[in-house]
Image (tube, rainbow, N blue to C red):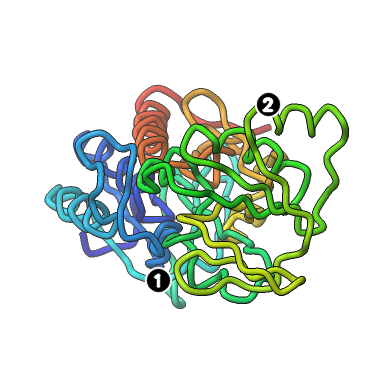
């Protein structure tokens, strides 16, 4: 394709975006994937819980997916950040189209899929950022098994960390490091005790070695792995530019979608971590599949009109 007009533009070329592109490529639609190369799980060396891909480097999964998707001749790829998005409504017909800006070039499409991803907002603890995805995690289902029932620490960020602490004893002996984030009430203390969770009241000063926690009183606690609930934000302002409805979850806002991943803006679909409160590679792939099919069905059977 030599022009900048497409049936569908997908912003985000990670697991959800690639899954959407695969469905659309197989439907022989003209597709452009715009991606800036910042996968959320780029810090992790292994992916878990995704059938047929358990223990595989997530970068390998993404690279193989891209290779397979780009075999479809109607799919193109542009590396870069989509820095502007606009919805156009044609005077008279009321039909919708979209314009996306990438490094000064404008691309046009009939439909738009937002696979924007999210950015984790990590606690401001010395040594945590460089251990994120390696020995400090957020998802027990993704990383708990590999700790081999060793000692687990939960660094509290808010009262939501109570749920984290109550989950993790199934993966290993668990200590809840309150770190001044909240104080469990009597019922919560009882629930923690019933699960065998140890409570540590002294604040966390820093992390060292693999997963050692240095406390403010000078003690160092050694763990096989650490977990913390990090708030997140959608990685791009494109959703806000378009005015799609958002919904607030326990850790941040995500794009609101219907069962086929359609947003509140006709012709705009969303998938992956930016469009669901729970995140995993498997869920992102499923979301992308739905979004690709949803966008194609919209092109086949619906003409979008506006008053």
Most foreground residue, 15 or 80: 15
Please say if the residues under marks 1 and 2 sit with CB atoms less than 8 Å apart.
no
Most foreground residue, 62 or 76: 62
Q: Which residue is mark 2?
A: 194
Find residue 82 and report its horizontal and vertical position in percent.
Answer: 48, 65
- As drawn, the residue found furthest toward the front would be 219
Q: Residue at x 61, y 53 (%)?
A: 228
Asked if residue 198 shows in the view, the reply is yes
Q: Which mark is residue 141?
A: none
Left or right of 81? Residue 174 is: right
Find residue 283 and report its horizontal and vertical position in percent.
Answer: 41, 35
Asked if residue 93 shows in the view, the reply is no
Look at the picture and state if 153 lies above or below 211. Answer: above
Q: Which residue is mark 1?
A: 80
> Callout 2: few (<14), some (14-19), or many (20+) C-alpha neighbours within 10 Å?
few
Question: How far apart, in angstroms, are the residues tagged by discs 1 and 2?
Answer: 50 Å
> Callout 1: few (<14), some (14-19), or many (20+) C-alpha neighbours within 10 Å?
some
Q: Residue at x 78, y 43 (%)?
A: 159
Q: Residue at x 45, y 25 (%)?
A: 302
Look at the picture and state if 270 lies above or below 298. Answer: below
Most foreground residue, 19 or 242: 19
| Residue 215 falls in image quadrant | bottom right
Q: Earlier in the sequence, mark 1 or mark 2?
A: 1
Find residue 52 and report its horizontal and vertical position in percent.
Answer: 19, 36
Left or right of 63? Residue 234 is: right
Find residue 155 and report its horizontal and vertical position in percent.
Answer: 65, 55
Element under label 2?
A: helix
Q: For the C terminus, which image quadrant?
A: top right
Element under label 1?
A: loop
């Amino acid at each position: 394709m030599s022009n900048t007009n497409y049936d569908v533009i997908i912003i985000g070329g990670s697991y959800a975006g690639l899954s959407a592109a695969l469905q659309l490529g197989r439907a022989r639609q003209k597709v452009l994937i715009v991606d800036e190369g910042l996968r959320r799980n780029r810090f992790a060396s292994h992916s878990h819980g995704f059938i047929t891909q358990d223990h595989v480097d997530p970068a390998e999964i993404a690279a193989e997916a891209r290779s397979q998707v780009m075999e479809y001749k109607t799919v193109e790829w542009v590396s870069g950040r989509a820095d502007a998005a606009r919805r156009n409504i044609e005077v008279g017909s009321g039909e919708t189209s979209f314009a996306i800006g990438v490094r000064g070039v404008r691309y046009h499409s009939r439909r738009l899929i937002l696979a924007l991803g999210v950015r984790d907002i990590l606690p401001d603890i010395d040594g945590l950022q460089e251990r994120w995805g390696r020995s400090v995690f957020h998802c027990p289902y993704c990383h708990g098994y590999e700790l081999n029932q060793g000692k687990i620490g939960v660094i509290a960020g808010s009262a939501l960390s109570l749920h984290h602490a109550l989950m993790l004893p199934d993966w290993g002996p668990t200590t809840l490091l309150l770190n001044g984030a909240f104080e469990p009430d009597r019922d919560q203390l009882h629930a923690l005790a019933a699960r065998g969770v140890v409570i540590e009241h002294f604040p966390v000063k820093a992390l060292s070695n693999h997963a050692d926690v240095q406390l403010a009183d000078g003690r160092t606690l050694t763990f096989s792995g650490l977990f913390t609930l990090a708030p997140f934000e959608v990685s791009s302002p494109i959703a806000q530019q378009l005015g799609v409805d958002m919904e607030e979850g326990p850790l941040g806002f995500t794009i609101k979608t219907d069962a086929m991943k359609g947003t509140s803006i006709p012709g705009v679909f969303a998938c992956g971590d930016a469009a669901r409160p729970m995140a995993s590679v498997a869920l992102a792939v499923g979301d992308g599949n739905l979004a690709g099919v949803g966008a194609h069905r919209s092109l086949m059977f619906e003409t979008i009109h506006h008053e």
